[in-house]
Image (cartoon, rainbow, N blue to C red):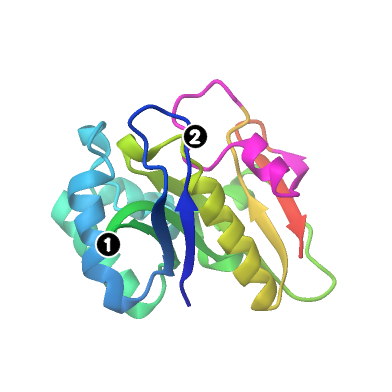
């Protein structure tokens, strides 16, 4: 399923009127995903280019040991081909310009380990599953144009359709932090999320579907 909408922005040199398409990540789109992460996603922060969006999917020990960019790239490919890494790609004119990593909460080893280490017991819904939004990554020249918000809207739409009871997100508690890759509290509030817990460094925000 593809969702199409127009990008509108008051920013000078923006991309007003260009059609954006949102596609769920699948093995067939792996090469598009790699092209984005290899060349565009971290164009303004080359030191982060080895990320390949693995943080949420690895326990801390593996994360610390897996430092070679090519090995991390290959690990991401394996997760995509297995269907273990899930999310949405935003396209403008057939070029990926944004990404959202979203999955069942139980599939994020990072969250499981973090919750256990700090003694946090997340509330469980009476019925249904919890889907977690782990991160957003918008290409540098396309930020501030509502792409992350469009991705979030699509996540909410599909999660409800797929029978999830809640959506959870984990924005940084420090709103002045420059790199809000978990998404901002304000963005989630505009989409109907409310704070469920304060874990010092991050907030747990939740939306009932």
Q: The C terminus is located in which quarter?
A: bottom right
Q: Horizontal and vertical percent for residue 152?
A: 57, 54
| Point 66% across, 44% down: residue | 188
Q: Is residue 7 left or right of residue 139?
A: right
Return the residue at label 2: 180
Taking the image as drawn, is residue 200 in sight? Answer: yes
Is residue 64 rendered to the left or right of residue 151?
Answer: left
* Front residue (pair 50, 114): 50
Given residues 63 and 137, the one toward you in this image is 137
Task: Provide residue 182's location: percent of width, then percent of height.
Answer: 52, 43
Spatial CA distance of label 1 from label 2 is: 26 Å
Going 63% across and 40% down the picture, which residue do you hit? 187
Residue 96, percent across and down? 30, 56
Q: Residues within 10 Å of mark 2 (few under 14, many from 20)?
A: some
Q: Quadrant of residue 121?
A: bottom right
Residue 30 x, y percent position in the rendering:
26, 70
Q: Which residue is pictured at 60% across the width and 46% down the height? A: 117
Callout 2: helix, strand or loop?
Answer: loop
First of labels 1, 2 by sequence position: 1
Judging depth in this view, the residue of 9 and 28 nearest the camera is: 9
Among the 4 quarters of the image, the one containing residue 28: bottom left
Magenta span includes 177: yes
Q: Which of the two marks, 1 or 2, is nearer to us in this view?
A: 1
- Span shown in magenta: 174-198
Residue 120 counted in the magenta span? no
Helix, strand or loop at label 1? It is loop
Q: Which residue is disc 1 drawn over?
A: 94
């Amino acid at each position: 399923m593809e969702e199409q909408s127009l990008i509108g922005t008051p920013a000078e040199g923006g991309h007003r009127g260009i059609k954006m398409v949102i596609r769920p990540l699948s093995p067939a789109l792996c090469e598009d995903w790699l092209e984005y992460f290899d060349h565009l996603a971290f164009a303004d922060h080359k030191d982060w280019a080895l990320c390949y969006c693995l943080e949420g999917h690895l326990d801390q020990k593996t994360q610390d040991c897996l430092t070679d960019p090519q090995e991390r790239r290959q690990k991401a490919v394996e997760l995509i081909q297995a269907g273990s890494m899930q999310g949405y790609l935003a396209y403008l004119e057939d070029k990926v310009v944004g990404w959202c990593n979203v999955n069942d909460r139980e599939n994020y080893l990072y969250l499981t380990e973090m919750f256990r280490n700090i003694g946090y017991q997340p509330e469980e819904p009476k019925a249904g599953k919890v889907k977690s939004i782990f991160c957003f990554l918008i290409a540098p020249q396309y930020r501030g144009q509502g792409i992350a918000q469009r991705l979030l809207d699509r996540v909410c739409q599909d999660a409800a359709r797929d029978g999830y009871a809640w959506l959870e997100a984990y924005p940084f508690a420090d709103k002045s932090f420059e790199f809000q890759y978990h998404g901002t509290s304000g963005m989630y509030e505009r989409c109907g999320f409310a704070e469920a817990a304060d874990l010092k460094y991050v907030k747990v925000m939740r939306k009932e579907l």
